Image (spheres, rainbow, N blue to C red):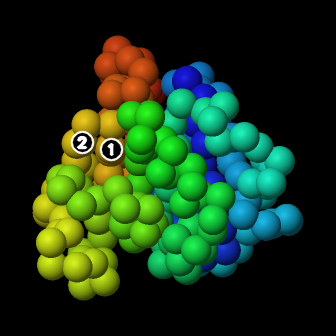
């Protein structure tokens, strides 16, 4: 599987790193894409170095598009035309989409959440309309959409992505190796 993980300044580092690392342990081809050139400073000051930048990739080359949260990073994902177009394209084609924490707001900006079951970080729902509200669960799957609640759910979210999009057996193997 080829996974695309866009990151921006202010992303949640725990979520980004756990998603990237867990999927790579499953031997997925994971590309970390910065929305801008250079090092990304995550929400708690951790510096992350993307593999490439958005303008150098073709999102249609990927099977899965996964968004880590973090409020400032989510704002950037919500406002980035390329990310928003990719989200809409993935959704229309039934390709796998995932978000964790506040990144549900980027899904909403792309018009993906209405009528869907999803989860997000508590309090994010206040920024969503009353007809688009999350459920209080750690990880939720609705069709080709997988969402996670927050940093503490990052391993479960990542393992669910592996199980749903790739192989349940691989997810079991990766879980065992992580001692979860």
Relative height, residue 42 to residue 110 (above, below): below
Q: Which residue is mark 1?
A: 145
Residues at circles 1 and 2 in contact by the CB criterion of under 8 Å: yes
Residue at (33%, 44%) from the top-left corner? 145
Residue 56 visible? The answer is yes
Residue at (48%, 41%) from the top-left corner? 90
The image quadrant of residue 93 is: top left
For the N terminus, the quadrant is: top right
What's the CA distance linking mark 1 and mark 2? 6 Å
In the depicted view, which residue is nearer to us: 55 or 159? 55
Q: Going by the picture, which residue comes out furthest to the top?
A: 169
The answer to whether 148 appears left or right of 39 in the picture is left
The image shows residue 24 at horizontal and vertical percentages of 59, 32
For the C terminus, the quadrant is: top left
In the depicted view, which residue is nearer to us: 32 or 97? 97
Q: Secondary structure at mark 1?
A: strand
Q: Which residue is mark 2?
A: 141
């Amino acid at each position: 599987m080829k996974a695309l993980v866009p990151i921006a300044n202010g992303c949640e580092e725990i979520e980004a790193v756990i998603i990237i690392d867990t999927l790579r342990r499953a031997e997925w081809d994971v590309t970390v894409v910065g929305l801008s050139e250079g090092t990304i400073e995550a929400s708690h000051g951790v510096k992350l170095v993307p593999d490439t930048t958005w303008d150098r990739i073709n999102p249609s080359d990927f099977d899965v598009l996964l968004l880590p949260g973090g409020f400032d990073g989510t704002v950037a994902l919500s406002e980035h035309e390329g990310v928003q177009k990719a989200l809409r394209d993935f959704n229309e084609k039934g390709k796998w989409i995932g978000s964790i924490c506040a990144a549900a707001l980027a899904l909403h900006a792309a018009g993906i959440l209405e009528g869907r079951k999803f989860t997000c970080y508590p309090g994010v729902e206040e920024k969503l309309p009353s007809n688009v509200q999350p459920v209080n669960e750690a990880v939720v799957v609705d069709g080709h959409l997988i969402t996670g609640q927050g940093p503490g759910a990052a391993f479960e979210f990542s393992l669910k992505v592996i199980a749903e999009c790739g192989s349940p057996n691989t997810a079991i193997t990766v879980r065992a190796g992580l001692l979860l």
